[in-house]
Amino acid sequence: MAAYLRNRNNSHLFLLTRFLNSASLLRPRWIETIAYEEARSHPDKPYTSTAVIIHGFLGSNRNWRSFSRNLLASLSNSSPSSNWRTVSMDMRNHGKSSEKKLDPPHDLNNTAKDLANLVKAEGWSWPEVVIGHSMGGKVALQFAHSCRNGEYGDSAKWPKQYNLLSNSELATITILEFCSVSVAEFEQCDQWLTTPL
């Protein structure tokens, strides 16, 4: 019967079949999360703090493996009692996340939301530090903006520190430390978010 209906040239049956076979709003949708790599300063112990690393445009988490290892070594030496981990994420349509079926639009807001969805899906604590390179820095600021506005729910906690890395400056600049940043200073960072990707 189904083969007969598919072979008939009836446009109304074609539309009905197409509607019945299409994704419906009533069907449950699973949240697909982005790809990531995790590294720990002491893999045999539970981690106590998390730093998320977000690569730049056309990059992937692989670009930051050495940086991640060096950061963990430095943090381990400076504070032996803490056990840090890094989570290096692949932004949507980059690296291994390009294999995922992430819903459009593929914009800055959804890229930042991918980080929040990853934290929630994995059942992690919210990260203490977010580090972004180039476009990843814009994602980090959008994440801060959305956390501030309560877009990720009541459980979301602002990271204690955001670092933006720039190719032109070749240095880590601490943009926001929420212990001391004023609303006016954060609003200046919000203006940066309005510029196109």
Image: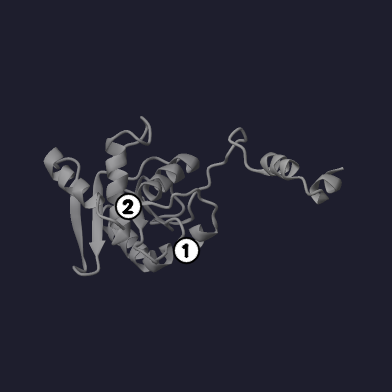
Which quarter shows the C terminus?
Answer: bottom left
Is 181 placed above or below 42 here?
Answer: above
Which quarter shows the N terminus?
Answer: top right
Q: Is residue 182 visible?
A: no
**What mark, if any, has residue 139 been given in the picture?**
2
Graded by Cα atoms within 10 Å as few (under 14), some (14 to 19) or many (20 or more), the crowding at tag 2 reads many
**Gap between marks 1 and 2, in whole Å?**
16 Å
Residue under label 1 = 95
Q: Secondary structure at mark 2?
A: helix
Is 89 placed above or below 14 here?
Answer: below
On screen, residue 39 versus residue 27, left or right, reads left
Question: What x and y, as percent, mark residue 132?
Answer: 30, 57
Graded by Cα atoms within 10 Å as few (under 14), some (14 to 19) or many (20 or more), the crowding at tag 1 reads some
Q: Secondary structure at mark 1?
A: helix
> Residue 25 occupies which quadrant of the picture?
top right
Question: What x and y, as percent, mark residue 16?
Answer: 71, 39
- Please tell me which residue is depicted at 50% across the width and 60% down the height of the picture: 98
- Please tell me which residue is depicted at 32% across the width and 52% down the height of the picture: 139
On screen, residue 178 versus residue 22, left or right, reads left
Type of amino acid at the residue the image marks with label 1: Gly
On screen, residue 6 versus residue 169, left or right, reads right
Is 7 placed above or below 94 here?
Answer: above
**Mark nearer the N terminus (1 vs 2):** 1
Type of amino acid at the residue the image marks with label 2: Val
Question: What x and y, as percent, mark residue 188?
Answer: 15, 47
Camera-nearest residue between 29 and 61: 29
Question: What x and y, as percent, mark residue 43?
Answer: 45, 54
